[in-house]
Image (cartoon, rainbow, N blue to C red):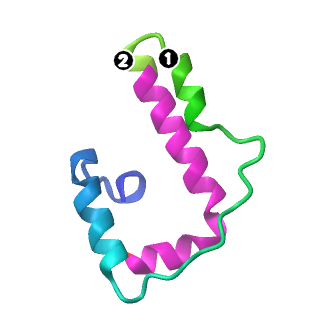
């Protein structure tokens, strides 16, 4: 929602709740994240700006890993 539709980060909890409360929500097999950036990579940030850059890179990596499910996730939104 944030990466593709520009939703404000502060709206995340409300938007996620709306998404999972929908009857159409079903389990998706998670992708293999081996070799991808993880949340622990965010610990390398030395400044707030670097932290923001790493968070955005991590989010992009996670969204990319879920590419096979993008159509389903978009339909939920």
Quarter occupied by residue 35: top right
55 or 13: nearer the viewer:
13
User: Considering only vertical position in the picture, is 15 above or below 69?
Assistant: above
Q: Which residue is mark 1?
A: 45
Q: Magenta includes 25?
A: no
Residue 77 screen position, x and y as percent: 36, 74
Other-residue count near label 2 (Cα within 10 Å), few / some / many at <14 / 14–19 / ≥20? few
Q: Which mark is residue 13?
A: none
28 or 69: nearer the viewer:
28
Mark-to-mark CA distance, 1 and 2: 7 Å
6 or 63: nearer the viewer:
63
Are circles 1 and 2 on residues that touch, CB within 8 Å?
Answer: yes
> Magenta stretch?
51-76
Q: Secondary structure at mark 2?
A: helix
Other-residue count near label 1 (Cα within 10 Å), few / some / many at <14 / 14–19 / ≥20? some
Residue 59 screen position, x and y as percent: 50, 45
Q: Which residue is mark 2?
A: 48
Q: Secondary structure at mark 1?
A: loop
């Amino acid at each position: 929602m944030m990466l593709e539709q520009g939703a404000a980060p502060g709206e995340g909890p409300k938007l996620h709740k709306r998404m999972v409360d929908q009857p159409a929500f079903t389990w998706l097999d998670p992708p293999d994240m081996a070799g991808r950036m993880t949340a622990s990579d965010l610990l390398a940030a030395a400044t707030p700006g670097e932290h923001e850059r790493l968070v955005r890179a991590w989010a992009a990596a996670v969204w990319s890993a879920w590419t096979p499910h993008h159509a389903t996730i978009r339909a939920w939104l």
